[in-house]
Image (tube, rainbow, N blue to C red):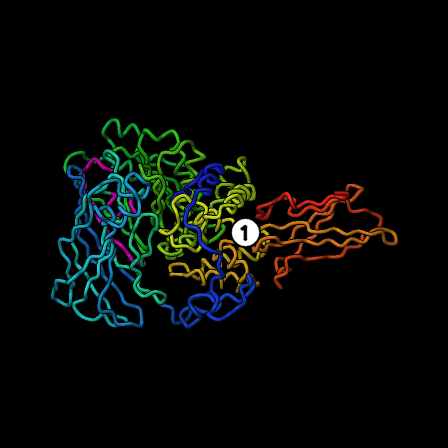
Amino acid sequence: MQKIYRSMAVAVALAGVAGGAQAQQTAGMRPGVSDTSLFAPLQLWPSPSAVRLGSGAPGRAYWQNRADYNITAQLDTARKQLRGELRMRYKNNSPDTLHFVWMHLEQNAFKSNSLNSYYYPQGSRFGARGFEGGDVIDRLNQVVGTRTVPLRSRVNETVMKVDLAEPLAPGGTATFDIAWNFLIPEHGADRMGREGSLYELAQWYPRVAVYDDVRGWNTEPYLGQGEFYTEFGDYDFAVTLPAGYIVAGTGMLQNAQEVLTSAQRERLTRAARSATPVRIVTAEELRSGAARPRSTGTMTWRFRAQNVRDVAWAASPEYQWDASGWEGILAMAYYRPSAAANWQDAADQSRMSIQEYSERWFRYPWPQISAVEGPISGMEYPMLAMENRSEDVYDLYNVVTHEIGHNWFPMIVDSNERVHMWQDEGFNTFINTFAEARRYPDRGDQMARAAQERRIVERSLASPTAVPVETPPDRIPPAALGITAYYKPSVGLQMLRQEILGPEAFDDAFRTYIRRWAFKHPTPADFFRTMEDVGGRRLDWFWREWFLENTSFDQAVGRVQARSAEGGQQVTVTFANRQRGVLPVRARFTFSDGTTQNFDYPAEVWGTNQREYSRQYQFAGKTLTRVELDPEGRLVDVDRANNVWTAGS
């Protein structure tokens, strides 16, 4: 989802009023163990096994289930309603026999008296805003051989338990036949909805929940703030709607000859080979009526997507459509003429985004990426990114590259967003700093952008009401969401890269994590273990302080004792650590002749739980006049006033 805060001032102000204080506790300790040090061995979840190895890699026994969908839907623009039918083929790759499945009915968040309506008051960003909607199941069957068997079900808020017609053994498949409908909310928790004749459709079909080796059935309700956790599969879907509409969707358009003019088809072919945007549907064609092959009746748009975890689509009769190509991948933008001032740059912004993330981390695996303009402020789905019109091209790129970045986290690396939001938003916020710096370097390089985020987090640590990063998203106070799920994990990764592992080791480990868990379901433990396995360093202390606890940081220059020695000066400097959190020591010594010398020590110097760390130095022919900790502001420190010692002070 979109980066929630766009300025340090707003972020810091909101962090100061965040609710939900939690006591600082050492996470992961076994009962009866008295060592509460940051450096105590971290007992991660789940324990290593043949499914998930101690190295952080998936093991030989790793498994995950699969769901393939064939969907047809009709959009009734008069009633603002969607009707659909689907066949879903569910493959049980688990070692367990299943007697029932759970499915998501996420439109039920928009019913009166839903959990969403109690969690988020009317008018809030993630609330239903007084809309009465919800999924209506018209048909629920299982196809067993040549028989069609009606199934018994029980709806619990946004999930539905479906009893199978017969047990589903390991390696077996079950085919479901479902028909449903729902009224489309104007504001669907800022993740889908409509504005005038424009529709953005997501969470729009019943889909099977994830059954995994960690939690069994994952049945966390859809409340709005927390996002999704779904299985991979192949999708064929068809959308029928008024002929004047232009549709963008996950996957590749399968019937361009039916829904596009010959000129538009030629432009689309040319765009795939063009580094500069080609106008597929132009403003002039929209004005003249030549944008569509015909303007009366209905038209069906057909899409196919392979090995994705979801599909979504957007449609408007006013969409201009631009496209360009990068190494055979289409990068496209759909926007209304009223947004054209900024959005004429969006196809190129999309192209640069997939290029940056592909070259730096993991190649984009799908044939296209589409950015669509509409009322949703920022939301991501496979191959489809929703953004609003934005204030300027810089603001637009920040949102476009953020939503497209989500195609890596969590559309490729499919973590559980309903439980571990930071594995999705935090990782993505981190990789965004590289993309933003690449596009607009005059507005700050990657390190400068990371420093801005670090100052936001540094100030937020002074609030006693912040919550740990590893907090389920629907338990994070909305005012603290940006700090907790976006900026703090991003800053943690930045410091791990620059100050602890070093860029070469970090990048190697981070790329390995993506490669190991591409199209799979990693846990936080899989990430932690992979970073240690490939980075070559035990990091129990860092995971505990930065992700599992609410730890603060304050290094200081404690004491400086100097005495004359033969030909120079002997100095003992005592560095102090005045909060629980530990970080490397970065010290700069300044001498009477104006020269400086840097001394760096790893965070492990605090490993025996001492609050002070002393070093003795011998300086020939010079006198120490100043000691400063973290002179470049590379670390997090809540009190920098105690970072400096000067001679005579």
Work out whether 300 lies above or below 468: above
Is 238 within the magenta?
yes
Work out whether 389 lies above or below 306: above
**Relative to residue 67, is residue 548 drawn left or right?**
right
Q: Residue furthest right?
A: 566
Q: Characterize the local packing of mark 1: few (<14), some (14-19) or many (20 or more) Cα atoms within 10 angstroms.
A: some
**Quarter placement of the C terminus:** top right
Q: Main secondary structure of the magenta part?
A: strand
Q: Which residue is mark 1?
A: 552
* Residue 60 % position (x, y): 41, 71
* Residue 254 % position (x, y): 26, 48
**Residue occupying the point 23% across, 51% down:** 205
Type of the residue with mark 1: Ser
| Residue 346, picture quadrant | top left
Magenta region, residue range: 232-256
228 or 179, which is in the foreground?
Answer: 228
